[in-house]
Image (tube, grey):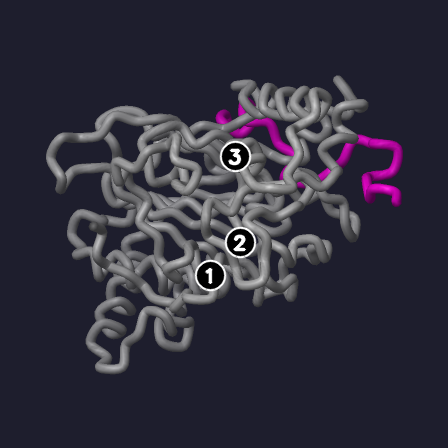
Amino acid sequence: MSIPMPPKLDLLQHPSAWHGNTLTQHPTQWCYTLTTAEISELEQAAECFIQQPEGDLTQICPASFPLPLLSSKLQALHQQLINGLGFELWRGLPINRYSLTEAAVIFCGLGSYLGAACSQNAQGHLLGHVKDTSANAQDNDVRIYQTAQRQTFHTDSADVVGLLCLHAARSGGDSMLVSTVSIYNALAQECPELLVELFKPIATDRRGEVPAGEKPYFEIPLLNWFDGQLTGMYQRQYIESAIRHPGVPELSETYVQALDAFDRIANNPDMHLKMRLQPGDMQFVHNHSLLHDRTSFIDWSEPERRRHLLRLWLSVPGDRQLPGVFKQRFGSIDVGQRGGIKTATTTLCVPLATN
């Protein structure tokens, strides 16, 4: 069976095919600062939602969180994510004057304009808390975002991932983004024989969060060519830990070389864009066109100052079609109704406790 790939490994043209060293010089293309009026609108919408007796963050939507002033800007953000650069950073939210509940309502309400929130783990969390839980990064059932170690470039299991920074680390914890198409183009020029390997199915560990009737791993190629679009699905640590499961073969030498080449290009400082998220920053990233990473960090000793980000996984209406193989991870490939992690015991919820 032939592997779907771009014709003749041609170089691909797409607005998301950027280089970090270029975007660094033009932050106005990807960074937006909220106005005083827009902040006031977000605060008023949050206050009204919290005061509603039936207010339920699992059900928050544009109708229950009206943003007439920001709605056009959010429509532009939607297009920037799925048809443009693939990301955007919003600054200026005065996070220090909000309770955790108020911050969560603002973030979830704003996110509802982009898409439906997806479960981020087997517990059904629609709102994630990204912080160091002192988990052991060497434990194959631990997800790397629960530690202070570097994550490496990867994608999440949803169309879009959003982050809201509540507290930054004492040092480190920088966010990095890189274009999947730009990595592909570099591989096509430098080592096309290795690039072919990355379109073959490969096992990726589910880290113990296994949907009913599924294997403890899924087999989706790192690179997928479908309907004229290149889509990535990657987490190297989880590819390497998948070999613990029966039936998963050791990685071939050639495939390891292909992964090494992919990672080498992604880690080239000219290729990726690095930014330090400050309290109140909101970052939105399209998983199908970009990969994201976070450097290791040293945290504060005071519990109330420790690095803490809120996270959303969003299923986005109007996004690209995905190949059928994504059903293994996304459950469904229906646009606007796909993504997330669900097991037989998953119950959707929005936790505000941070452990």
Q: In this picture, which residue range is highlighted in magenta?
A: 1-25
| Left-right relation of 146 to 24 | left
Tag in front: 3 or 1: 3
Callout 2–callout 3 Cβ contact below 8 Å: no
| Left-right relation of 11 to 131 | right
Would you place residue 278 above or below residue 63 in this image?
above
| Nearest the eye: 275 or 262 | 262
Type of residue at label 1?
Answer: Cys
Type of residue at label 3?
Answer: Ser
Q: Which mark is residue 241?
A: 3
Circle 2 crowding by C-alpha within 10 Å: few under 14, some 14–19, many from 20: many
User: What element does badge 3 sit on?
Assistant: helix
Residue 110 spot, x, y in % from top left: 39, 61
Circle 1 crowding by C-alpha within 10 Å: few under 14, some 14–19, many from 20: many
| C-alpha gap between disc 2 and disc 3 | 21 Å
| C-alpha gap between disc 3 and disc 1 | 25 Å
| Left-right relation of 299 to 337 | left
Q: Which residue is mark 2?
A: 158
Question: Which residue lies at the image location 45% right of the left edge and 62% below the top edge?
Answer: 117
Question: Which residue lies at the image location 53% right of the left edge and 53% below the top edge?
Answer: 158
Type of residue at label 2?
Answer: Ala
Would you place residue 238 above or below residue 83 in this image?
above
Q: Say which quarter of the image contains residue 317.
A: bottom right
Q: Quadrant of the N terminus?
A: top right
Question: Which residue lies at the image location 70% right of the left edge and 53% below the top edge?
Answer: 325
Tag in front: 2 or 3: 3
